[in-house]
Image: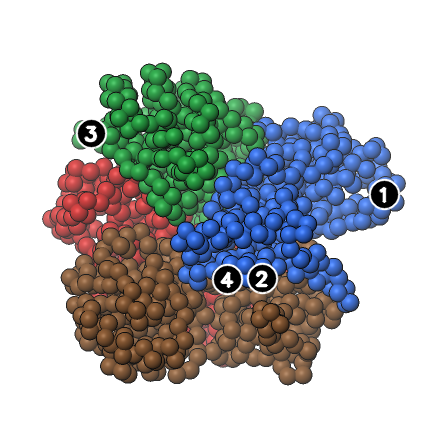
Chain colours: A blue, B green, C brown, D red
């Protein structure tokens, strides 16, 4: 069998572990050939690739990033390229293509699959917001990095007697905020799923100070927004030079809370640190299993599908279903956090 | 409501997170009272306890160990103490008891539950071998510690051109060996579930050297044993002074492999390091959820039950079912590891 | 002997290790009594303190923050309080006072020492800019945290084909930027000691892209500034609400570099994460030694002095000398970084 | 200029950082050529080498192990090979050779230097026992790994109410034991420099239990030995199969302490984990500086020398002096540990 692999979208710890696992399973166990396309879909559209043998994946299991490179391709661009992709697949004699990527990538994968190409997707997102899998690799690492930062920030907040507003990743969903906030014992957790009322938040934090505590940690997902009318909010946009000029939710929250509480409040924006570097053991195991099962699916001819975790099992789920809707934090999960808004 | 809590059995990262979560949910949200028994069942049998308010659990979320202490009590001892326990429960006006512990503790919990005491169990084991839950807290930390050690050992094995035989925890099951071995890319993984053939193992490792590699890492669970007749094996025992004199599986394997392969082989025994210290974010979240749901179960009167993870949900499962059999590594999971024996 | 201890200024990993060491040495070995003043100089001025026995410092060695609390006191305030401090010292029967703090604290310490109070200072700053000691505790932890972040950011920068401008702490000196930049292999390091020329910096980074590399990491100390006339630069200030509105050097650099290089550039501001949490082993040992030697100095009557590291030895140096000038990065050290501007 | 590099002896975090630094400084800044010999002196004796350009050292800064391989060569073997080495050096047109290694390597380096070869040594040992430098790279990482393990073991020792005897590296000197023991707050530290009296040790640990504590941590260097007559001690040796059969000092101590104290005592042997894997930021900076200065020394013609850290400066010291005697822990340093034997 001949298998093509590509990684697409933003960085995510575990990408290399999937690539390695695919090559190990396919080459060592099945005697397949594997080629890796460079920079995601671009590589497929331009037939830019290299052969991946066992040596090519030596020592990459714990490495962040992706040895194949990545890129973001606009959907239109890909739509126009379906025939070109089909041609390259035929020329290269590929029996299966395994794209590893997030929501956008999986939508593109579905497009190609609907056009008849033999696709097995592997879901990837640090945000954990893909509906048909319990968890995606990269999420555990992101939560771990955020939690370690929160652990450190707690002692500083306490020494300085401040409120720290810590912004973590999550444009549409609050999974990282919820898990890192629970893991680190944050005093309030603000998620996009539930627009916050600034008054309520100030009261929650204020109660802590009234109870004699001298600091507070608020974890907020970058995509969190106030309830309408709750506070003036800069929803972002480009300035005249075309630069993003969104103040960021943490910065705006810290100004508001400082005024309402009369306590020093400071924003901390964790940013890209959450999405790179060595994956945790959990993510390496999940990524390795996804790769292994993707190869098995290809050998069984289970195309148009995506690997997914259900409980302790890796299953296949249809690409169509996978991208139908985002997996948001259910309010009953949010309630478990004890320190909800 | 008045709730008693105790921790029993070996150390496990996340115990304090459960205690904290129980107190937070019970005291802050329900207005309950919580008492903590000292040193596990001993505290219950001797009515040795202290009140746990919110301050008592401040700052313990990320702390290893257990603020309540732990101990191992012989089953007979507990059986004889049922009436005493019942008396203390009545005297203290307890409406629920939440024991946090492993297999032995849960068996004891069932005994007391069968005797009519209001019990909600919380499962705990770094070994991950309790059947009715997908995962137990402590396991992720243990795997993480073992994986980090394996990552380090790889470069040393390579520099010294050696075979390293790394013994990880797991007397009856190979979960830690499987997950850490997969996460670190071990070249062979030996688990108790499948007695190993020393010849097969030597061949597997030998093939690596024949392929030009200069080192190998073998991960072995402490409870792994050779297939009958495969090799002479010291199954352990006490010496004349009553000291354990089992050479350990890693040590015996390293001697055998050195002779068979003609390569330097060395044992590394990770030991207690795997079961202590700060829990990972994953374990803190799981432990916190277990605590929260145990309190909810108590308030609903769901006694004789135990918290469990199923997929992404916390559910209740009967104590009876929980301790019926160990959760061993299924052979199809083992096969995914690519480097199985 | 009766010894008073206080911690003053910003958070710094290792403060608790010093406190613990002082108590261990004084109480356990010399049979002294130790009291800890709350919230730095404020505690001394208001005679707000508590007794510190061995139990009071149990389990704090690896804990971030300070169990005594901290605060910043204005110099004038302290100057006016000298007589009050002297009175409290007499009332409490203190034979020595050990303030642990940074430049401001040591200046205050000198003031009190000049006024005749028996002071032994312990220097503290994550910035490593106190002249008379080779290193201060807290610095190694800050560098470690920044380096770990840089390690992670590298794979993301590479996957996203970006320039990342990472701002680390250091208002007046570039020690953290220099060490973390060297440790992580940054492609340019910008320090306050040498105002940067934006054209030169763009050229340095640009050469990397011309050589076929696809990403670059620039580490910049928060206090770095452009050479006069090199670029427009927002030097900060308060907005009409009194909020700090300095865009920050990393943000300004990323806009400039993006335009000059035609490559995506993004700022990452590590912030407070660098100054809190568990100290590294190095910092714990240094902090412990400082505490031990401060007690010895007090017993010898060596007042008006400060503990300092010289090579592998802890020595005493006069408080007067300690605060004379900042220890900046010498240009020959900067040159060793290979990727200097 | 043409420079040869080799790494020799046991694994040590930072080896790759030195290699990278040498190549960066020599190739990028001086326009030199660098070749790397494979497997230490063997590569030099057999002219087995490869060219090292900038790409060859890409991404290795944080990598454990050595990309050049290492080996141990017997002194006689090297003595016999001096003329062969001289021939290869001439054939390859090498102007300088930079061996990176420990005591044995530096002795060999001196031999070749005395024979007229142009040598600049770089000292390497996790044990920190080379006399003419304040610190060697690798040591900080080893201490960090041991300290993290000790942090974890403390909670387990406490939960299980045990004495844990933790054996760390250090055959001849107690630096790792001293620093990790101080950093983790061990209750006794046993070093080779001061033969221990088992009665004294038991009393020290026993006092802790009498004071109401429920656990103790003893850190012991692998090379520690009892004072003569203090206890029966297995000094090791080979069994009939030629296998090392030394019980190890931690194991023997734990049996003795268990009997004398009537408390459970268990040995933990950290082993190889201490000497591999990613170096700390501290070690990466030190290793990078050593490499940089070794190239500078070569360009100045300062042969027969070795790089060394003195305070905050890198200096050169003669190879002759470097290997004269081991740097042992001075008793006044040992006394600072507070919990000395």
Left or right of B244: which side holds B195? right
- The nearer-to-camera label among 3 and 1 is 1
Q: Which residue is mark 2?
A: A255
Can residue C151 be seen in this snapshot?
A: no
Q: Residue at x 41, y 20 (%)?
A: B304
* Residue D124 place in picture, x, y as percent: 41, 62
Q: Which residue is mark 4?
A: A262
Q: CA distance from mark 3 to mark 1?
A: 75 Å
Q: Quote the CA–CA distance across marks 2 and 1.
A: 45 Å
Q: Which residue is mark 1?
A: A79
Judge the density around disc 1: few (<14), some (14-19), many (≥20) Cα neighbours within 10 Å: few
Q: Position of residue D284 (x, y in %)?
A: 48, 62
| Chain of the residue displaying label 2 | A
* Picture residue at 19% right of the left edge, 63% below the top: C33
Q: What whole-number distance in Å separates the C-alpha atoms at marks 4 and 3?
A: 66 Å
Q: Which residue is mark 3?
A: B242
Q: Quadrant of residue C64?
A: bottom left
* Subunit under mark 4: A
Write down the quadrant of residue D195 in the picture.
bottom left
Give the structural element (helix, strand or loop) at label 2: helix
How many discs mark residues in the rendered view?
A: 4
Q: Residue furthest left?
A: D229
- Earlier residue among tags 2 and 1: 1
Label 4: element kind: loop
Task: Describe residue C297's horizontal placement relative to residue B287 as left or right.
Answer: left
Badges 4 and 3, same chain: no
Q: Of the two numbered discs 2 and 4 on the same chain, state the one appearing first in sequence.
A: 2
């Amino acid at each position: 069998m001949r298998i093509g692999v590509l990684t697409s979208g933003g960085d995510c710890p575990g990408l290399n572990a999937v690539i390695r696992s695919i090559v190990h399973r396919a080459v060592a166990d099945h005697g397949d050939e594997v080629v890796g396309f460079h920079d995601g879909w671009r590589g497929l559209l331009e037939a830019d690739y290299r052969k991946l043998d066992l040596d090519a994946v030596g020592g990459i299991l714990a490495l962040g990033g992706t040895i194949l490179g990545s890129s973001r391709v606009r959907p239109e661009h890909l739509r126009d390229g379906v025939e070109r992709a089909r041609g390259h697949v035929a020329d290269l004699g590929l029996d299966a293509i395994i794209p590893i990527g997030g929501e956008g990538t999986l939508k593109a994968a579905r497009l190609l699959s609907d056009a008849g190409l033999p696709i097995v997707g592997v879901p990837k997102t640090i945000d954990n917001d893909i509906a048909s899998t319990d968890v995606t690799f990269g999420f555990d690492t992101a939560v771990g990095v955020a939690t370690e930062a929160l652990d450190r920030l707690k002692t500083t907040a306490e020494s300085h007697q401040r409120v720290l507003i810590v912004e973590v990743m999550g444009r549409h969903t609050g999974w990282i905020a919820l898990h890192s906030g629970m893991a680190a014992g944050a005093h309030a957790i603000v998620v996009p799923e539930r627009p916050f009322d600034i008054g309520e938040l100030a009261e929650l934090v204020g109660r802590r100070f009234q109870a004699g505590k001298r600091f507070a940690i608020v974890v907020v997902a970058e995509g969190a927004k106030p309830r309408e009318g709750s506070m003036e909010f800069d929803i972002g946009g480009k300035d005249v030079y075309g630069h993003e000029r969104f103040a960021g939710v943490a910065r705006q929250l810290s100004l508001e809370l400082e005024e309402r509480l009369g306590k020093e409040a400071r924003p901390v924006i964790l940013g890209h640190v959450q999405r790179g570097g060595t994956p945790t053991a959990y993510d390496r195991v999940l990524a390795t299993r996804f790769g292994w099962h993707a190869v098995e699916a290809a050998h069984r001819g289970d195309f148009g599908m995506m690997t997914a975790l259900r409980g302790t099992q890796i299953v296949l789920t249809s690409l169509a279903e996978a991208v139908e809707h985002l997996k948001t934090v259910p309010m009953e999960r949010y309630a478990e956090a004890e320190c909800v808004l």
